[in-house]
Image: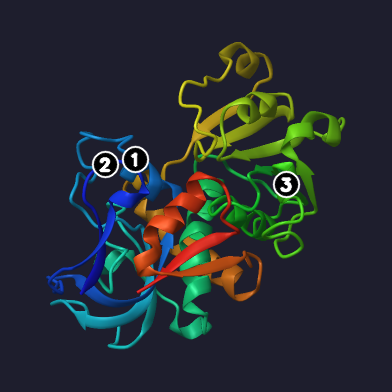
Amino acid sequence: MKAVQVTQFGQPHVLALTELPDPEPGPGQVAIDVTHAAVGLIDVYLRQGLYEGVPGLPQPPYVPGLEVAGTVRALGAGVTDLAIGEQVVTLSASATGGYASVYVSDRARVLSTQAHDLDPALAVAVVPNALMAHVALTGPIQLHPGDRVLVHGAFGGLAAAFPGIAKQLGATRVVGTVRGERLAGAGAGRLPYDRIVDSATMPTALGDEKFDVIVDPVGGQVRTDSLGLLAPGGRLLLVGNAGGDWQHGVDGNRVWQGNFVVAGFNAGGYLPAHPQAVPAAAAAALTAAASGLADTEIELLPLADAATAHERLENHTARGRVVLVP
């Protein structure tokens, strides 16, 4: 099979196209002919070596890739509820293996999209993130009908899944923030935001408006400013650090004085510990994708251009989601 490997930690050029043996499914597993593999910031962070030496996380050489869409190629022993050729999407348990023409997953992590007739590029770009958004908004942060929601980095891969899921769960208003140069960019007018504002002018632009839930995949000063935008008893959900400020901290005294809740959501740790949350989240994610509630912009690149995809995420020039095609 064709695959892209991280040969060593470093710059995007360490991503190398190679040939590897076709993997075979073991008991309880599914082999997938990959048609689309999404590129995410976790792929970039792992390749950069931010988690070098961390137990359980990939070390070179490895094949990156968290999100995969394709068709069922082969079934391992005990898997009887999928059919060869069925359209599926899956989320890797180890954030590895997706940048390849064949991928093997545990059956529990494979979701059929066949009945929804989804474009596989849309499925891989939207469904796993929408699933995670649903779990995050119903688990660590419990969104209530009538809540007002603010989403930072509004057009980013994971962030773009939150407005549609929030609306499904009963949010009455969802506002997004982006950098000024992206105000008219990917996702504008396509995602169900009630308003988009420039993050650089955020406190002023929003005036006295307060939010019950703020979703922050950005970090840094945006995270600090968020505390001033929470309604009393509001909840701040941390889902990433796209801004790259790894030394930033949250002021505990402000959290205490505002009766705020600050919670983190890392799918790699949360989903295995809460498998009961997945079925409802999967159903919501498929509905969101099929109904256009997560209609983000998608850029397709050949598998051989994985390094270019990583460069675009690093320099923030990606428009919507970047998806590799083997």
Coordinates of residue 248 in the picture (x, y in percent): 52, 21
Residue underneath mark 3: 181
Tell me the distance, in whole angstroms, between the alpha carbons under discs 3 and 1: 26 Å
Q: On the rendered image, what quadrant is the C terminus found in?
A: bottom left
Is residue 20 shown left or right of residue 149? left
Task: Classify mark 3: residues with Cα within 10 Å, few (<14), some (14-19) or many (20+).
Answer: few
Position of 38 relative to 267 (above/below):
below
Coordinates of residue 62 in the picture (x, y in percent): 21, 53
Q: What residue type is labelled 2?
A: Phe
Residue underneath mark 2: 9
Q: Earlier in the sequence, mark 3 or mark 1?
A: 1
Coordinates of residue 37 in the picture (x, y in percent): 39, 67
Task: Classify mark 1: residues with Cα within 10 Å, few (<14), some (14-19) or many (20+).
Answer: some
Q: What residue type is labelled 1?
A: Gln
Coordinates of residue 225 in the picture (x, y in percent): 69, 26
CB of mark 3 within 8 Å of CB of mark 1?
no
Residue at the image position 44 percent from the left and 47 percent from the top? 41
Q: Earlier in the sequence, mark 3 or mark 2?
A: 2
